[in-house]
Image (cartoon, rainbow, N blue to C red):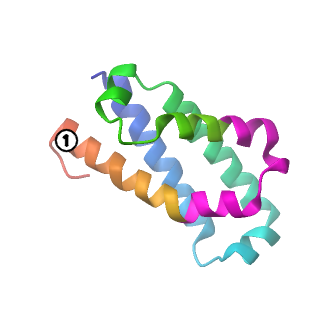
Amino acid sequence: MKVRDLSRINKIIEYIDNIEEDVQGMDVNDYSADRKTKFSTAHALGQIGELAKNLSDELRQEYSHIPWKDIMRFRDRVVHGYDKMSLFIIWDTISVHLPLLKEDLTKITIEITGENT
């Protein structure tokens, strides 16, 4: 496993933290009405997908339970067609899937480093 992978994983976790902070206390209606938050989360979701694309094949294969291809495809949809995406799909990703991804990535960093971050 490359040191670069760990750095990218930590950056993904940082973007998830940023999204969680941006939407804290919101529901889907609040999110829908908040243009700045929608733009900031779209940027962060795109960056998460881009970082996932740049993880080594070795890491993605070792942790194949994580839906890497879905994450990368979602990035493409966010970057190239965000205005055409369902708000509910985006909200579901933010409120359901990102916390699970963060949990998995945190476990990976602990496994790689042997440290609880």
Instruction: Give x and y (percent) for residue 99.
Output: 45, 60
Splitting the image into 4 quarters, where does residue 76 fall?
Answer: top right
> Is 34 located above or below residue 19 in the figure?
below
Given residues 81 and 40, the one toward you in this image is 81
Q: What's under tag 1, amino acid-wise?
A: Glu
Instruction: Give x and y (percent) for residue 38.
Output: 74, 58
Q: Which residue is mark 1?
A: 111
Residue 94 relative to residue 29: left or right? left
Q: Residue at x 64, y 41 (%)?
A: 74
Identity of the residue furthest to the left in this view: 114
Splitting the image into 4 quarters, where does residue 43 fall?
Answer: top right
> Is 101 located above or below residue 1 in the figure?
below
The N terminus, quarter of image: top left
Instruction: Give x and y (percent) for residue 55.
Output: 43, 26
Secondary structure of the residue carrying numbered label 1: helix
Q: Is residue 82 magenta?
A: yes
The magenta segment: 76-95
* Dominant secondary structure, magenta: helix
Given residues 57 and 45, the one toward you in this image is 57
Q: Is residue 75 magenta?
A: no
> Is 48 located above or below residue 42 in the figure?
above
Q: Residue at x 82, y 62 (%)?
A: 35
